Image (cartoon, grey):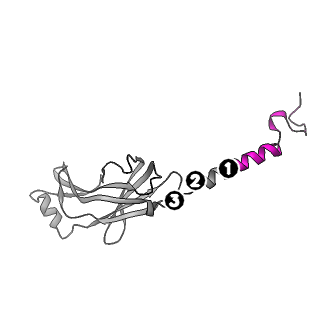
């Protein structure tokens, strides 16, 4: 048995043989060359887009509205099985982030996703007697954009779509 101070390599710590190293390198090169990355901006279409302000009910005796966006993704390349999405609600006047909603896995079935709805938790509150419709007309009401970012596993985020959240009341 060798001591920890021994200078020779231990049996379980031998260097990789040249044949094994060559085979591993060839396998990695083959894998990389056969799976070129998908250009998500070219491969994906955002369809069936609708936006508005969802009636989140009464919170602390105040009417609450939150921004909402609904859409579907269509894979025109036929190469995607799933993606990750990050929908960011940004203030339209200065681009400041209001809230982000991350969905780690969105699956494609028959080349498209289900209809996806993203709603912020943070929104605007109005005190009665101000109605929800009046809230949307208020001069202090700030418009928002919904920005859809997409990526494949371990890739960079790509901005896929940006849309202004319409000043319409959504109840469903």
Looking at the picture, how far across and down is residue 171, in whole percent? 17, 51
Boundaries of the magenta span: 2-26
* Mark 2 neighbour density, 10 Å: few (under 14) some (14–19) many (20 or more): few
Residue under the point 36% across and 69% down: 95
Spatial separation of the CA atoms under disc 1 and disc 3: 22 Å
| Circle 2: element type | loop
Looking at the picture, how far across and down is residue 38, in whole percent? 51, 58
Q: Which mark is residue 28?
A: 1
Residue under the point 78% across and 43% down: 20
Looking at the picture, how far across and down is residue 116, in whole percent? 32, 51
Q: Are marks 1 and 3 in contact (CB under 8 Å)?
A: no
Asked which quadrant contains residue 169, the reply is bottom left
Asked which quadrant contains residue 11, the reply is top right
Q: Which mark is residue 169?
A: none
The number of discs equals 3
Sequence-wise first label, 3 or 2: 2
Q: Which mark is residue 156?
A: 3
Tell which residue pokes out farthest to the right in this image: 7
| Circle 3: element type | loop
Spatial separation of the CA atoms under disc 1 and disc 2: 11 Å
Q: Which mark is residue 35?
A: 2
* Mark 3 neighbour density, 10 Å: few (under 14) some (14–19) many (20 or more): few
Sequence-wise first label, 1 or 3: 1
| Circle 1: element type | helix
Looking at the picture, how far across and down is residue 127, in whole percent? 14, 57
Q: Nearer the viewer, residue 6 or 9?
A: 9
């Amino acid at each position: 048995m060798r001591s920890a101070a021994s200078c020779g390599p231990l049996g379980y710590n031998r260097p990789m043989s040249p044949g094994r190293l060559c085979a591993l390198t060839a396998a990695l090169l083959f894998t990389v060359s056969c799976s070129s990355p998908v250009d998500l901006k070219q491969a994906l279409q955002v369809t069936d887009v609708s936006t508005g302000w969802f009636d989140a009910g009464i919170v602390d005796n105040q009417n609450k509205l939150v921004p909402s966006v609904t859409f579907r993704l269509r894979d025109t390349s036929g190469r995607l099985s799933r993606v990750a999405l990050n929908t960011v609600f940004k203030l339209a006047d200065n681009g400041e982030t209001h809230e982000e909603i991350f969905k780690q896995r969105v699956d494609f079935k028959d080349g498209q996703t289900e209809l996806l709805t993203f709603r912020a938790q943070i929104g605007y509150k109005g005190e009665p007697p101000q109605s929800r419709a009046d809230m949307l007309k208020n001069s202090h009401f700030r418009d928002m954009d919904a920005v859809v970012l997409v990526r494949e596993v371990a890739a960079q985020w790509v901005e896929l779509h940006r849309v202004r959240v319409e000043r319409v009341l959504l109840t469903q």
